[in-house]
Amino acid sequence: MTEICTSAAMARTNSHWEAFTEDVPWFLTGNDRVVVGDVAYPGTWRMPNALARTFPRLADLLGSANTSAVSVGVRHYVLFSWEGEDGISAWLSPRPSPSPRGDVLPAHRDLLTVFGGITERSNEPETTWLLNTNESLTIEEASNDATFVRAYDWAFVEIPGGIPIDLTAYYSISREANGNNTFCHRLGGDVLLFAPDHSFDDVEPLEGCPPYTLYRRRGGGTFVDWVETVARQWAAAIDG
């Protein structure tokens, strides 16, 4: 990699990184040292075959991306970027770890060894489940379990026994700024959406639950389903 800037204010030479930072200027703050590699073209990054069989749509999407290695201070990332009719869209992904920590679903742990999730997005379409999210699929986001739902226990007072799931058995895979949260069961891999503030039309309340609490999302009932649906949505949007 080559150092192309030493602060957020200095010029950049990687056009895909430049497009990313122009769209999400809040990502770079302070005077962290920023090091960005050259753009590697589609096909350079490939998901291992075993994982690609589990996540074929994600494998195709990431394999079709341009990639750039990026360091911001002590944080290391891969920028996955796609050139489309509406310009360059991108996912900023933490650099994967060969031994990701945390108590997560085995399929998620395997994925994290090659793809670190999504810290930030740029030029994003409005037709994907990633819209308005903070982080998705990262090990940092996975450190949050579902126990925050206890603050809404008043919404479940008419359900015998209260909240009908073991909140510690679930962990977050994607969180919206407004508090909506998608979480996954650590062992079974089923995915639920807690949405106290939503206008979604692709959700069905979890059995017996009142509106604006726990839902299943059509096309996202399991971890693999959720990841593959997000990949399909993003691919469709950037392909026009």
Image (cartoon, rainbow, N blue to C red):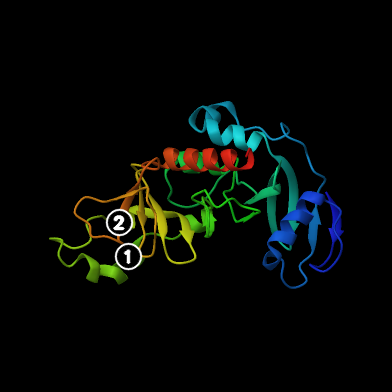
**Could you tell whether 200 is left or right of 124 in the image?**
left
Tell which circle, 2 or 1, labels the residue nearer the N-terminal end. Answer: 1
Q: Residue at x 68, y 68 (%)?
A: 26
Q: CA distance from mark 2 to mark 1?
A: 9 Å
Asked if marks 2 and 1 touch (Cβ < 8 Å), the reply is: yes
Q: Camera-side residue: 234 or 127? A: 127
**Residue depth check, mark 2 versus mark 1: number of the one nearer the observer:** 2
Residue at the farthest left position: 160
Point out the image quarter for the C terminus: top right
Residue drawn 44% across and 43% down?
A: 226
Q: Is residue 14 above or below residue 240?
A: below
Q: Is residue 213 left or right of 178 when viewed as pictured?
A: left
The kind of secondary structure element at disc 1 is helix
Q: What is the number of callouts on the image?
A: 2
Residue at 70 percent of width and 60 percent of height:
23
**Percent x, y for residue 133?**
52, 58
Q: Amino acid at mark 2?
A: Leu
Q: With 160 as the anchor, is 52 left or right in this view? A: right
Secondary structure under the numbered disc 2 in the rendered image: strand
Residue 53's x, y, as percent?
51, 27
At x 58% / y 51%, what residue is drawn? 118
What residue sits right under mark 2 in the picture? 214
Label 2 crowd (10 A; few <14 / some 14-19 / many >=20)? many
Residue 149, label in figure: 1
Residue 96: x, y in percent? 62, 46
